Amino acid sequence: MAIFLLVRHGQNDSIGKRLAGRLPGLHLNEAGKAQADRLAKLLKNLPIIAVYASPLERTQETAQPIAQPHHLPVETVPALIELDFGDWQGQELETLKQNALWNQVQGHPSDHCFPGGETFAEAQSRVVKKLLDLNDQFESKDMVVCVAHGDVIRLAVAYFLGLPLDNFQRLRTTPASVTVLNLQEGKVSFGPINYSMEFPEFSD
């Protein structure tokens, strides 16, 4: 049973411009590095006992500064990787918006499978399964960081909120943001981090 800090990776040059997906070699830019460093300072006094990250460079580079003050390794978790966008990977967003399937992605993502890639439901299933598996490995109030990607985090949050898959894009996760997910004895809650206290505060 754990408190998960779901961290989106920091800024990079593809955000808002192209669908990067699982492209290799995409690193944090200077703004993203600054975001990761600031986040590491904010989290350094929390009792974090494990740091996990997607295999991609931008998540690893966000996770490393967080793990360092706690003298923890960054453990790579393939299930936290970005969606497989298939043939859409690497394409400019303005180009994709002209695709006939774009409206389906925005309005009815539960019906969409990326050509040559995966469905949103498949991505949601893999990340939720991994979080539940990890949760079984920890004790109550153990604090765990998972650095992943915007859609992956939103899909997980939608599941635990009971939000229909078609509505998951109503959620927002900005670069280097933290979403606090508390899984305790079959109960789920979300809450803000109180950086001045030992643990986040949660309301019933």
Image (cartoon, grey):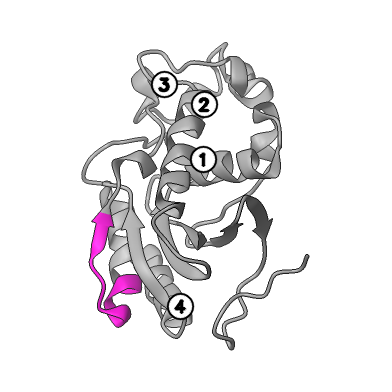
Residue displayed at 67% across by 57% down = 189
Residue displayed at 52% across by 46% down = 153
Secondary structure of residue under mark 2: helix
Res. 158 visible in picture: yes
Marks 2 and 3, how far apart at CA: 7 Å
Residue depth check, mark 1 versus mark 4: number of the one nearer the observer:
4
Tag on residue 43?
Answer: 4
Q: Given the image, on which type of amino acid does mark 2 rest?
A: Phe
Residue linked to disc 2: 120
Which is more N-terminal, label 2 or label 1? 2
Marks 1 and 2, how far apart at CA: 9 Å
Which is more N-terminal, label 4 or label 1? 4
Marks 3 and 4, how far apart at CA: 33 Å
Q: Given the image, on which type of amino acid does mark 4 rest?
A: Leu
Residue linked to disc 1: 151
The image shows residue 2, relative to residue 167, as above or below, that is below
Give the extent of the magenta segment.
65-75
Near mark 4 (Cα within 10 A), the count class, few <14, some 14-19 or many ≥20, is some
Tag on residue 186?
Answer: none
- Confirm or deny contact between disc 2 and disc 3 (CB under 8 A): yes
Q: Is residue 66 left or right of residue 72?
A: right
Q: Given the image, on which type of amino acid does mark 1 rest?
A: Asp
Residue linked to disc 3: 118
- Confirm or deny contact between disc 1 and disc 2 (CB under 8 A): yes
Residue 66 spot, x, y in % from top left: 35, 72
